[in-house]
Every structure is written in structure tokens, then in C-alpha cells.
Image: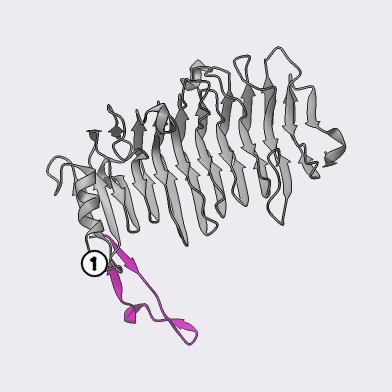
Amino acid sequence: MRTHLYLFSAGLAWAAWAAPVFADTVITVGPGGQYQAISDAVAAADADPDPGTYYVIDVMPGIYTNDFPTVTRPMTIEVAPASTGQPVVLQATEDLPNEKGIILTFASLTVDGLTFTGARIDDSLGGNGAGIRDENTGPATLVVRNSTFIGNQEGILNDGDPDEAITILNSRFEDNGNPDPDYFQHGIYIGRSGSLTVGDSLFCGQLIGHDIKSRAAVTTVENNTLYAGAEDPADGCGAGSASFAVDVPNGGVATISGNRIVQGDAAQNHNIVAYGEEGLPYNHNSVAMAGNDFTSTAPWTATALYNPSCILVDLVGNRFAGVPMIANPLACILSQ
């Protein structure tokens, strides 16, 4: 049984011997498990009237077809620890019946080691079926680790709540997007949430929209590899037709550091990163870009940063290949 140990201070000493031990309630899914569908396990957890119980849904490797959980209480859904690294695939082969996402969450959620594929809804409904659709309100978190989003109209779609923190780590976003040019979907699209952190992840093959679009008050994009209209067979990446690699359209505090960003000739825009082009609703606005490696092979004058609101930019230690325009406008660079 998985447990949480809480230690309470007694003067200067930690009285571990007196600490209560709280156990997560673990539900197993898959061959030999308590449930055969992830949605059934989540529904059982959701039905518990005790808000103090924390559920962990451990899923055995396999393909879970048209299995659409709706999360209404904080929980973790993960590949079973004994099978870490083996594929747990949530595959949609039909239009999403909830018209939202393969997983639809209204509560804090941690996802670890899952693959989402095939999420779609009709274009008349928005054409933005997501691997994860996050509709949290109030203080909440969404944490996605070690997961893959491939061939969805939208990888992760968040409605935006100022009290929510979103963290995405060591994950892969490949070939997401809507091929209809009238619909502009993204690898990740975060509304006006409190914060977004994306780290150590790969984005490639995105169609038409952006790899990352964030309207959060604080956006941090660190140590990722992002392709916009460029292929890389070594990474298993097709070219796609992405527009921006990173778009922070409403400003806020943006930190973009340590990334490898590659623009190819299939990209939809000569700008690679955009900031503040849709207005600045936040009181605090800043841009820091450090230690990024920008490369463009596109047949146009590529621009690393489009910053029409002219927020002063800390631009330090970046490398540029085939990117003749470092920033537009250049006058808004604070340091370089």
C-alpha cells in the first residue's frame, strides 16, 4: 500500500514516531485489475463522498479504446508503477461524446505515463477535441509527466483559471492539430491561468497552429525541443505546418530558456516566438530569453521574437542560425 508520511515538529526535534500515516487509495485497471476501463475506475473514485480520500488510478499497459474518463475530484492517473515505461494508450476512434477531451477534468489531476491519440470532434463544434481538456475552477493543478499526445486535434486544452498552475514535463506532442485551415489548434493551449511550466518535452508535426500557446499570467518554457514546419527523422518528427513555436499573446511574465527551436520551410509564419500581440491585460509584463538555440531553414527573413507591444526583453546567450532578425522591434532589446 502506498502511504504518505507526515512529520510534526516537537520543539527542535521531528517527532516521526507520533506522526499519522495516510494512505492513498489505489484502484487498479486492466488485466487482473479491479476495473477494465479507466472511466469506470475514475467514476468509482468520483462517487466517494469523502473529500479527504486521495485516489491513485494505476493502469496496466494496453490500448484503452474509446475510454473517456471525467474527473471531478483530485486524483492521479498513471501507468502502474511495476510497468513504468510500457505503453498505456487512450485511443479515440470515434468523435468524443463529451465534445471536449479523452480525459475531461474539473479537478486537480496528475497524469503520468499515458498516451493520448485520436481526439476529435466535428468542426461545427469547434474542431478542437483534446487529449486532456482541463476545465478547473478555483485553486487547482494539472500535472502531466512522461506522456505522449499524438494525432489529436488539440494536445492539451485549458479553459483558463487564474488560480490554477499547470506543469508539463518530459512529454511528447506530435502531429496534433486540425488540418482544416479554418480551424487553428495547438499542441498545448492554455487560457488565462495562473501559470504554465513546460520542460524537457518535444513538439513536432503540429498542424497550422502553434506548438505552445499560453495566455497564463506566468509562462515558463525551458529545455524543450520545438519544431515549427521542420522535420527531423532522428526524433521521428514529420514537418507539419506549425505557425509559432511559442506564442504568449497576452504577455505576462514569460521565461523562455534552454530550448532548441527549429523552423522549417513548411512553417506558417516567419516569426518563431511571439509575445503580447493580442494585448496586455496583466499588470506585470516581462520577457526573458536565455540560452536558446534558434535555427531556421525557411526561405524568408526569419524573426526569433515578435514583440509588437515593445516590452523590454532580456535576451542573453542565445544562438541564431539562419535567423537574421533577432527581434522585431530591435529597439526593445534590454540586453544581449
Residue 318 location (% of width, % of height): 74, 34
Residue 127 location (% of width, % of height): 43, 30
Residue 105 location (% of width, % of height): 37, 49
Q: In the picture shown, does residue 252 fall above or below 114?
A: below
Q: Please, which colouring scheme is shown?
A: one colour
Q: Is residue 117 visible?
A: yes
Q: Which residue is mark 1?
A: 49
User: Which residue is at the front of the view, 258 or 98?
Assistant: 98
Whether the magenta-drawn stretch holds residue 5 is answered as yes
Quarter the N terminus occupies: bottom left
The stretch in magenta equals: 2-22
Number of labels in the image equals 1
Whether the magenta-drawn stretch holds residue 281 is answered as no
Residue 235 location (% of width, % of height): 49, 22
Q: Is residue 4 left or right of residue 137?
A: left
Q: Which residue reaches farthest left?
A: 32
Q: In the picture shown, does residue 256 fall above or below 74?
A: above
Q: Identify the residue at image location x=42%, y=27%.
A: 123
Q: Identify the residue at image location x=77%, y=36%.
A: 308
Q: Is residue 335 visible?
A: no
Q: Identify the residue at image location x=70%, y=26%.
A: 271
